[in-house]
Image: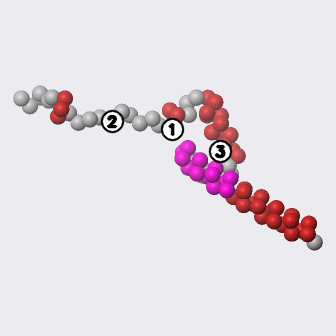
Amino acid sequence: MRGDRSKATRPMVAPPAISERDMVEDSRLVKQVRELRRLVPVCREPCGLGELFQDTATYIEDLQVQVKVMRMLLDKLSDE
């Protein structure tokens, strides 16, 4: 019989993936993501959460380097 398929021969269907939109439906998370986008000047628009987090990490690393350089300059200038 052509139309008769057993469960063993049916292809497995993966459950639908949770989209980024579903993850940030919570209004608190939406506000936090919006604020993070505002604070991180290197965020590409439009970008997903993955890109936003990567840009945020890069921005934090850049700020840490700037602080280190400013401390070195301050130490050098205070020695003179």
Task: Measuring from the top left, give residue 25's x and y in whole percent.
Answer: 55, 30
Look at the numbered disc 3 and give the secondary structure of its residue: helix
Task: Measuring from the top left, give residue 24's x and y in whole percent.
Answer: 56, 34
Toward which corner of the image does residue 77 lie, by quadrant?
bottom right
Residue at image x 20%, y 33%? 10
Q: Which residue is mark 3?
A: 37
Q: Which residue is mark 2?
A: 14
Horizontal side of 6 relative to 56 (left or right) equals left
What are the residue bounds of the magenta stretch? 48-61
Q: Is residue 13 above or below residue 71?
A: above
Residue at image x 77%, y 58%? 67
Q: Residues within 10 Å of mark 2 (few under 14, many from 20)?
A: few
Residue type at the position of mark 1 = Glu
Residue type at the position of mark 3 = Arg
Q: Which residue is mark 1?
A: 20
Instruction: Verify whether residue 60 appears in magenta.
Output: yes
Residue at image x 47%, y 37%? 19
Q: Earlier along the polypeptide chain: callout 2 or callout 3?
A: 2
